[in-house]
Amino acid sequence: MGRDWSGLSQSIKSNNISKAFEILFQRYPASEGISSDPICFPHHYFNPQDREIIAFLTAMMSFGRIASIQRCLAPMFESMGESPYDFVREARFETDLVFTQYRWIHRETMMAWLFCIQEIINNYRTLSNYFESFTIDQNESFRGWLHRVSQDLRGQVLSQWDIHYGGHGSNQTPAQIQRQIRFLFSDPASGSACKRWMMFFRWMCRTESPDFGMWNFLKSTQLMIPLDTHVVQFARHFGFVQGLTVNWKMTQRITEVFRGLNSEDPLRYDFALIQFGSSGACKHRFDVSLCTSCPCLSFCSEGNSGL
């Protein structure tokens, strides 16, 4: 059973969670973890219009092992040349894109997505302008805003597939394409944790390294935690959540805890925790050689299980 976090501030104070997380933040500086994270791809670009397109494609395609993601995306982005923005705007992807399939995402789906981005460029000039056009009403939740964005993108990409491939010898049925599109653009209204969306908005809106802070229509205080597998495991070890289901409610709950740690920058410790787990410094089970010197030992159920 996890801890009762109803007395959040007192629990955080008594367990020194803020202090322990700050130690991890200093121990795993963002600059040392970029190369092993999907964010490495948009870091290769400096023009904002190029970077936001690469970030969008990277984030939505970041599922599976990092090595597999990199093997798929590296040649695709190389085929886009120095300016992915121009590559998409001029529809050079119709002939020059290096992409066949990544897991269950087929080439036709990727092409329809790029046609969609091209249409967005034609209508809004930049991706930033497109996302900002979905104004967040004062009384609207982040969940409601993202639902509208997701539904719009799903409809646009499906429409582009129908225009360019529907009825033209496609080897994909509309139902198959719809499943791929629904997966790419997850919707919190269906209960999804929307990890890849949360990661994308962290990259684009949070102003501290390793993120870019390019978009200001979402504030750092509004961002939600991307539920990376290591973050979820730590949340369970530390008693932030109960149960096994990774869903939107878990996103909300863990974000609530992180806001209690740092209300101005709730995602401050996200990247450090991912690096802490992925580096092997935590095995998510008791290991005497690691746990006894871990700054999180006092409030970690796994660490205390072996003592």
Image (cartoon, rainbow, N blue to C red):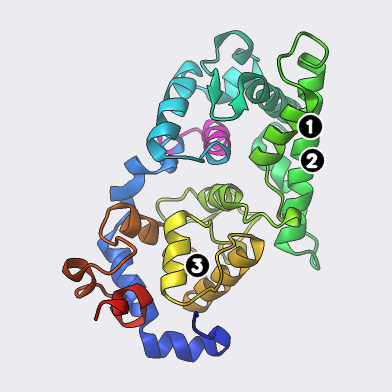
What residue is pinned by disc 1? 156
**163 on left or right of 80:** right
103 vs 151, nearest the viewer: 103
191 vs 87, nearest the viewer: 191
Q: Residue 124: x percent and y percent?
A: 74, 34
Amino acid tagged 1: Gln
Residue 229 is marked as: none
Q: Does the magenta-highlighted stretch encompass residue 47?
A: yes
What residue is pinned by disc 2? 152
Which quadrant of the view contains residue 250?
bottom right
Q: Secondary structure at mark 1?
A: helix
Cα distance in 3D space between marks 3 and 2: 29 Å
Q: Secondary structure at mark 2?
A: helix
135 vs 193, nearest the viewer: 193
Q: Earlier in the sequence, mark 1 or mark 3?
A: 1
Q: Secondary structure at mark 3?
A: loop
Q: Which residues are magenta?
A: 43-58
CB contact under 8 Å: marks 3 and 2: no
**170 on left or right of 42:** right
Question: Which residue is drawn at the image coordinates 46% and 70% (left, top)?
Answer: 236
Q: Is residue 71 above or below residue 166?
A: below
Amino acid tagged 2: Asp
Which quadrant of the view contains residue 104?
top right
Q: Which numbered mark, 3 or 2, is in the foreground of this view?
A: 2
Question: Mark 3, residues whose alpha carbon is within 10 Å: few (<14), some, or many (≥20)?
Answer: some
- The answer to whether residue 45 is visible is no
Question: Which residue is drawn at the image coordinates 50% and 80% (left, top)?
Answer: 1
Magenta part, dominant SS: helix
Q: Residue 54: x percent and y percent?
A: 53, 33
Quarter of the image with the C terminus is bottom left
